[in-house]
Image (cartoon, rainbow, N blue to C red):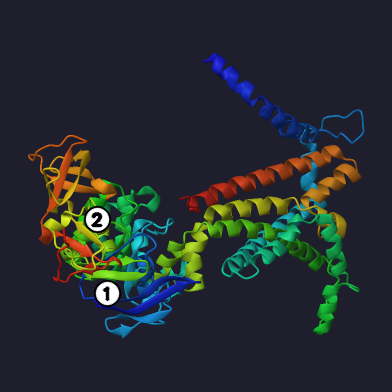
Amino acid sequence: MKRHKLRGWIYSAPAVLAMCVLFLGPVLAVLFFSLTDWQLGQKSFSFLGLGNFEALLADKVFLKSLRNTFVYVLLVVPGTVALGLFVAVLLESSEELKGIYRTAHFVPVMAATSAMAIVWGTMLNPSIGMINRVFHWFGYSGANWLRDESTALLALALIGVWQGFGYAMVLFISGLKAIPQQLYEAAEIDGADSAVDRLRLVVLPMLGPVMMFVVIIIAVRAFSVFDTIHVLTEGGPNYGTDALLYRLYVESFNFLRTGYGGAMAVVFLIVVAMLTLVQARVIDKRVHYT
Amino acid sequence: MASVELRNIKKHYGKTSVLKGVSLSVQDGEFLTLVGPSGCGKSTLLRIIAGLEDADGGEVRINGKNVAGVRPKDRNVAKVFQSYALYPHLTAFDNIATPLRMRWLTSIQRFPLLGRLLPETRRIERDIRGEVEQVAAMLRMSALLDRKPGQLSGGQRQRVALGRAMVRHPAVFLMDEPLSNLDARHRVQMRAEIMGLHRQLGTTFIYVTHDQAEAMTMSDRVAVMMEGELMQISEPEQLYIDPDDLRVAEMIGTPQINVVAIEKMAQHAGLYLAFPPDAATMAFRPECATIGKPLDAMLNGIVSMTEHLGADIFVHIKLDDDAGTVIVRTKPDAARHEDGAPVGVNVDRHNVLWFDADRKRIRRQAVKKIAA
């Protein structure tokens, strides 16, 4: 019995080692530093206990970035899922040029985000950008999208949707392909032959497992939004687009307040872990694996 | 209740012709089985009747009315699928209730949560509950109604699928190999249950299968299809003893009918039998032949194998001159033959079926003796 246990540990040693070095170690280190006033590069530090976390709760900028992050996630997740599903259903229902469209919609997922962010920055530019020109054509004045606090976060969310829906689409397409044809036929004979009824009776329930996966992945990705903010707005205007991960980066590496940044990382970790847990719990009840 | 009439139905996918002009009529209340090897077009024909697919030519009439352009849900047909095709996220009750909900409730009343609040919805839902429970009782599955398909066995799932079809009292039941996913024991049991349902409901049943035993045991009439054509349609017994085509004869009955090419037959066989002039093959059922002394019979050969099946014994006899192998059914009390023993096979000439080079049956009585 004892030897079997030992053997088990030996077999799993490489994985355990990698887990420790790449995941557990850093997490413990972050937890540790979040309790200190350590600054990047400094040789000494002192313990603050929960001081960093208390400071966080009083930090208006941090709270705003937290709120922005949630708003961003609430915009990006439904948008990405809806658009991804819509395009997937559209592509699956027609044979023509399927491959080209599928690839075209998937390109944003593969492209480097920061490069794409620069392109979006140019398009959203109030004077030379294409988007405002289109608005002018139709007689509207457009907006200074990324410099106006009321539109900046929305613009970033739209870029987020644009970047992610191809990924959702590919997953949805594979999910749609797995739905047996006879189920659609049964629904048709039973009287569910409108698009809405078919969606409710067959497509959405059968896509359950894929949907759960897509929502979790997209939500976690949205929570860790960084590139577009860094390239396009740097958190502005007036911290209107400041998000959790960006604030963490600024505190840790611009202001070198590593301990304080560590506390933010802990908050981020807790939020993402809870989100995943809640989603898995709630959605799992409504998902039907066959 | 309805009659179904098919007139010259044609269907092709690309260049492949799947149905080459099939005409048949099913009477009101009849149990008709379409049987044939896979790829013969029987399932496609069923889908065309259901309206899941459009024919490229010909017309479908249900109760005398041409249903071209009528959507499946408005044809008043129900279909049971081989894979059951139940909605996995719904309980057995909700699966059976679905066709009624789709018909009786408006899309507003079916709206999640809100629809339930309308008073009218509650009344209709009560009616639906009554109907579903009645059907469940008929199928003896009232206790299973709150289970989901994943928690049911194959036979129970097929019962739910039957319930979903029955609940709306369709004019025609279409069944596409409903028993092929079941194991042998359940298959025989469900066979009897489906026959019982047909008697009880008195509705028109059109049943598709590749299993000739199912076709023979369940149906009022059997339609044999091959390569997109209807070969023969008649009562099961008639099909067995009086097939129109060699392929039909070979399809129906186990073990298969014995077929011997005329040109392979020894010259002296003519002494025993009169050949129709254009006959290419002769065929006879295993039970129509007797084993006799060698060299003295219509067909001669050696015993290659004996199968004991309890009540019956099948003796496989390899004929001389490479004329193939025939099977003779004997009773356990008949004389036994060692493997390798030379024997003769005699067939009563009334039980021999003749087929021409096109595999069509020769029924003419005109015969000519072959000179020895």
Secondary structure at numbered mark 2: strand
Q: Residue B57, located in which quarter of the rendered image?
A: bottom left
In front here: B205 or B343?
B343
Chain of the residue under label 2: B
In the rendered structure, find residue A250 and report the number of the disc placed on it: none
Q: Quadrant of the N terminus of chain B?
A: bottom left
* Residue B302, horizontal then vertical, whole percent: 21, 41
Cα–Cα span, label 2 and label 1? 42 Å
In front here: B122 or A187?
A187
Q: Residues within 10 Å of mark 1 (few under 14, many from 20)?
A: many
Which residue sits at x=79%, y=68%? A151
* Residue B30, horizontal then vertical, whole percent: 20, 71
Q: Residues within 10 Å of mark 2 (few under 14, many from 20)?
A: many
For the residue marked with disc 2, what is the amino acid?
Answer: Val
Side of A182 where A89 appears, left or right: right
Side of A199 where B256 appears, left or right: left
User: Which tag is nearer the camera, tag 2 or tag 1?
Assistant: 2
For the residue marked with disc 1, what is the amino acid?
Answer: Ala
Question: What residue is shown with label 1?
Answer: B171
Residue projecting furthest to the left: B333
* Residue A182, horizontal then vertical, whole percent: 43, 62
Question: What residue is shown with label 2?
Answer: B259
Chain of the residue under label 1: B
Query: From this viewpoint, is residue B104 visible?
Result: no
